[in-house]
Image (tube, helix red, strand yellow):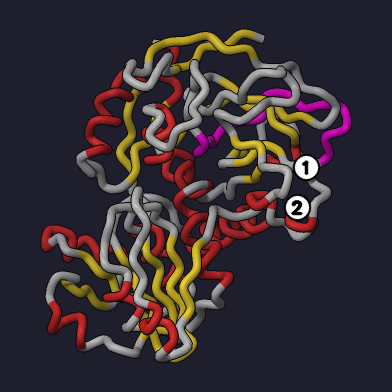
Amino acid sequence: MKINAYAVQNATSPLAPFTVHRRDPTAHDVQIKILYCGICHSDLHIARNEWQGTTYPCVPGHEIVGSVTQVGDKVSHYKAGDLVAVGCLVDSCRTCENCVDDLEQFCQQGPVFTYNSPDKHSGGMTYGGYSESVTVDEAFVLRVPKNLDLAATAPLVCAGITTYSPLRHNNVSQGQKVGIVGLGGLGHMGVKLAKALGAHVVVFTHSPSKVEDAFRLGADEVVNSTDENEMQKHLNSFHFILDTVSAQHDINAYLVLLKRDGTLTQVGLPPEPLAIQVGSLIFGRRNFNGSLIGGIKETQEMLDFCGEHNITADIELIPIQKINEAYDRLVKNDVKYRFVIDMASLKE
């Protein structure tokens, strides 16, 4: 089945109309009409080959919300008309230790990502959500809570799970003091989720313009990360810190803010290695780790949690014809806080 999409042909070309082939649903497949697709910074990195390894043509997009149009004859959990989502994963080996533990993102044979991954069905590469429809095995399809705004739900299956997973893994709960470093596409979700989990939330930012927004999103305190005196006031006081910054920065300035046995989890991916002073870990038995999205089971848990607490992303909805402008603005961090494409515009 041929469908309309937007693709890049090389690292320097703009996104432009393109036609891709989608398989007809097999026994366990769900065919989805894409209603909205979020724009993740990863889309830009991969489209422009900034992480290397991009195969062209490339159709980005892994924050998909849509409506089921057709299902295979062995599909048991979905039917035509259901509102569903597809995140960063569309398959895995399903048999390795990590897959059995519902951590498909760490599949030892390599997870199949929603785009720019080898596609075992077509023999080519997977194509993402900047398109009219997608066909996905039901095991990697997610159910969307009916009370949530569909467009603002799309970023949850990337930015939402990227921040929810480490918060849950580190047992963030009522009364704990939690820091969120950076207030962007990831950070704004971290604030909302940590607050809903009952934490006392402190946002670290170097942008005075974001202070008011941090409080609006639910922060209890906002700290200017460039003010040494403000930072010193919080020494040895945090149970958990979530670092969403993808630029080079002094990670040690935050490690020393952790309590004994506290943890800092890095989800932002700086282009260069971060310099860690080991003493920051040794003195206080502090922990430093990283986290990558989440498995399908946990992603569904996150969506259900967001449904219970009425949490969605703050978005700017755009027609797909403005996708290249959105990419340029994304480079400048000129969005509060996620772009989402209205895929109805693809037919215009």
Q: Is residue 69 magenta?
A: yes
Q: Earlier in the sequence, mark 1 or mark 2?
A: 1
Compared with 215, 272 (above or below) is: above
Q: Residue at x 65, y 18 (%)?
A: 124
Say whether residue 218 is visible.
no
Residue 31 coordinates in the image, percent (x, y): 69, 25
**Callout 1–callout 2 Cβ contact below 8 Å:** yes
Image quadrant occupied by the C terminus: top left
Residue 107 coordinates in the image, percent (x, y): 70, 49
Q: Residue at x 20, y 74 (%)?
A: 223
Question: Could you say whether the residue bearing mark 1 is in a helix, strand or loop?
Answer: loop
Q: Amino acid at mark 1?
A: Cys
Q: Residue at x 43, y 78 (%)?
A: 240
Q: Which residues are magenta?
A: 62-76
Say whether residue 252 is visible.
yes
Q: Which mark is residue 99?
A: 2
Residue 225 coordinates in the image, percent (x, y): 19, 71
Q: Which residue is mark 1?
A: 93
